[in-house]
Image (tube, coloured by chain):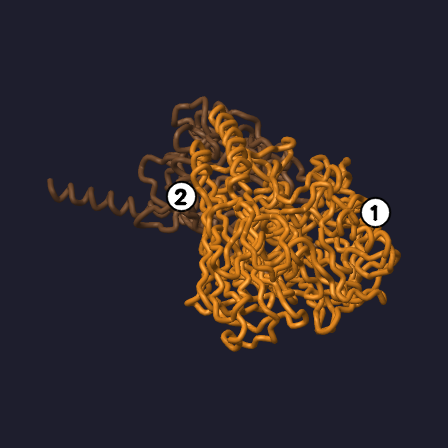
Chain colours: A orange, B brown
Amino acid sequence: MSRRYSTVYRLLYLLIAVMVCLFAFAGTIYTAMMQEITAQPLPRMAAIGAETSTITPTLMLTPTATLALTATPGAIVNQAATATPTLVATSTSTPDLAIATPTQMPTVPPTESVVLTPTSSPTETPAPTEGVVATPTSSPTESATPTASVVPTPTPSPTESATPTATPVFSGTMVVTQTAETATPYVTATPWFVLTATATISAYIEISPTVVVTATPIFTSTPSGRIIVHMYAMATPIAQAPAPTLIPSANDPHVSYDTSTSSCAACHRTHTAQGTVLRTAALEENVCFACHTAAGASNPFAGTNIQPAFVNNTNTATRFFKHDVTATSGVHQALESSLDQFGAAKRHVECEDCHEPHKATRGSASAPFLQQVMNGTSGVDASWTGAGLPAGYTFMTQAEREYQVCFKCHSSFTYLPSYLPDGWNGADYVANGLPKLTSPNSNQILDSRDMAREFNPNNASFHPVTAQGVNQNIPAGSWAAGSGMSSASMIYCSSCHNNPDSATQGLGPHGSLNLHILKGGANYTSIDARQTPNSKEVCFQCHNYSTYAGSGSGADTNFRIGTDNLHSKHVAEKGASCYACHNSHGSEQLYLINFDLSVVTPNGSANSQSAYIPTTNGGSCALSCHGKDHNPLSYSR
Amino acid sequence: MSQKFLIVCAAAFFLTIAIASIAKANGGPHGDYTTTTDACAGCHRAHTAAGANLLTVETEYDLCMTCHGAGSTGANTNVNDGIYTARSASTTGLSNTVNSSLIGGGFNKYNRLPVTSKHDVSSGLVIAAWGYSGTVALTPSRGVRRAITSGLKCSSCHNPHGSTNYRMINTSINTIPITVTVTDEGAAKDYGKEHWLSDMSSICDGCHSAYHVTTPGSGSDATVAQHGGYAHRVDMITSNTFLETTGWSSNGGVTVTLPLASQFITGTNTNNLVVCQTCHLPHGSSAAMAGFANGGPTGVDVLPGNTNTTDSALLRVANRGVCEACHQK
């Protein structure tokens, strides 16, 4: 017993020590490295090397630099202090530019590489300005040697030749090595495009007996031709033991079995069973509801009263307010693990799909790691080698993270449904009400029901369910008071998909009054009705309503011109919904941007994501919205 | 001299062969009858009988208890208290291999505690088999499928005049033919240890046919269980053979030992088969039932198949220790 506490205290001290070291390093380890490589106006490039009259830099975009930290109790401080991330970028002459489609990584011939070094040579032209790495536009015959400057300050015109003047925050170099194939450039609408390489380090440490923290630079292109280099740290527990069991009362039948246990009799009958696996009841959920219902004379053991979450909400074929455990019987198979058992005709949900009844316990957990009430549940892990679809899936008999449990049914691991879901227009339900999911418009970059695709950490942006978010520069004032959120936060699927009545009906995505099983006091508006979203919509659980939909200060958002809050302008003043411009889960464009083409019309041949062009200090939109032409309209901070 | 010796040997040999086929208690009135036997007088009186079937006492149960009861010296198998008096008593323990508990249990006490369930043979009345839902409208019905044709008495299962079956089990229980293979325990009978073979479960099948399910997957395959529900399989091989010798405990707590039957009559005694008697005591049990084992999650209700504080379903171990001993959750 004392051994266990001394270990806990020791780990606490180590956590504090690690955090101190990491924050100390934040000043010396760079937090953002911006490199822009600009090029002359180019016609559409169909293949590498097709254009020789203009020089564009080559980026080799397969990351080779990794930061590995192995933290063991007692050694974690030293390890953190000595593990310095090394990112080296090299570049050679005559780079060619290839920009891949948003779902592929840009490629260059293997023999070329981009050198991005913090030091610049004034004799070389072009030399980048602050924040701009390579401007090889001055002479077609000269080789462009982009240089890296680790500077967060704004850059002047990218066509300027100037000597870098900013002091690098980080004095390393970044290696960008290419292995992928050539792809057709994506953007043709703008006369020029910007290649930007950024790398940010953010760390997330989970204290466990042994944990490996890896930080790997990821390079992603965005629809507007922006190459994002970012790096996120993923903590991987070597061994994750379940938290010590906390039994709320002697009546908990889910854990701590010994040879005098009576817990088997809570759910099983040896000779007179009514359901498979010797359950007391024929319907799977009725075994659970025997105790997980209102306390009373017929429920002397009174588990958490979860039944109202299911009983009080009703699904339709296109409108889902609950995980309906009563919809199927006999479809769920114990120890199911193959994709056929989760989708199509076998698509089902029972309590035991998310809760392992012999291991469920109570205790604390933090995102993304599995909550104790789901301890021991199976899950599916996705293998992400690039943006977009995962390369493959691995079934886990015991999931480690909450999203792995959800991926069993809500990813392309299995077959996904194709019904047209209802949406909400602020006042009523609307059929086919998620237009970004179902639009036939070829310029609409579609949402996906495949959450492993939406939350792919290689995407340009995503809510931080599987990894920390790409955007680490979210103003502190933009978060809702009391939400505890920051740029470094990670969240669960159930951070949004939960029961607003959890105080009386239990936590979890069991059922909700709100469409899509969402938290909040009002439905999420997905059909634009030119009215400001309700302050009780789920987004504002974390994102400050005043900043995004009220009259909050411009300093609290990055979507601003000076102090002029452009979110206020669009949402509060013009009545745009969050959905009109942003995706809920992930996007191939920065900042979860993906315009709803049922209300937004991109200019020219831009699509729902390339209509937004980010710049170092702002961006511009080339679109038309309710007759207001943005042709383009720009903003800069 | 040698010829006489040979003849005596031959006679002894053939006598042994002649009587070896009848299983009987050693030296008791339960078999081995000859034309000069006095065994009949152990239980019967021709003209002055007090009970039916010319028994010396009024009821069959009382008769059996005159030798097999508490304080009796007629037999060392005291089935009233569940004690094997041939072995010195121990103040602790449940294991039949170590101390003097009878492996079949006791009708009034077991392990020095009052029983919480028993096959009540004292009344001789017809009683429903445990878990039977015939008097309660339940779908599917559960419990016994065979009709119970006569009252429950000692002689429902045991033949007092001897039997070819192990432990003098009747060759017919509830009109169902029963075969239980005898194993030769040698001259020194040991009623503290089982010598079970794979047909032990068939004894129970005479009345509890609904529970004698031997097909794999019967816990999840409704077509297998005969009464329309799902039932735990019996007569299956377990890898937990240690349960019979060293027992098992979780977290250093109570150690449970469970007797296992053997697959084979000769050769290696594997003792790796789970039979009905692995988890249940045929005579009576004093296992305590509490928590979920007292009525189940909704308390004592009409669902047959619940144990409670006054009905431990003949389980060997308190609560659901018999489950945990093998399934080790």
Q: Quadrant of the N terminus of chain B?
A: top left
Residue A550 is marked as: 1
Q: Estimate how packed mark 1 is, as few (under 14), some (14 to 19) or many (20 or more) residues with alpha carbons within 10 Å.
A: some
Residue A431 appears in the figure: no
Residue, far front: A123
Between A93 and A397, the one nearer to me in the picture:
A93
Q: Is residue A235 above or below residue B292?
A: below
x, y percent for residue A622: 74, 66
Q: Is residue A96 above or below residue A220?
A: below
Between A439 and B192, the one nearer to me in the picture:
A439
Between A279 and B304, the one nearer to me in the picture:
A279
Q: Is residue B275 above or below residue A451?
A: above
Label 1 marks a residue whose chain is: A
Choose mark 1 or mark 2, whichever is in front: 1
Res A330 → quadrant = bottom right
Q: Secondary structure at mark 2?
A: loop
Q: Secondary structure at mark 1?
A: loop
Residue assigned mark 2: B241
Badge 1 and badge 2 in a common chain:
no
The structure residue drawn at horizontal position 67% and vertical position 38%, both measured from the top left corner, is B295
The structure residue drawn at horizontal position 54% and vertical position 72%, both measured from the top left corner, is A54
Discs 1, 2 touching: Cβ within 8 Å = no
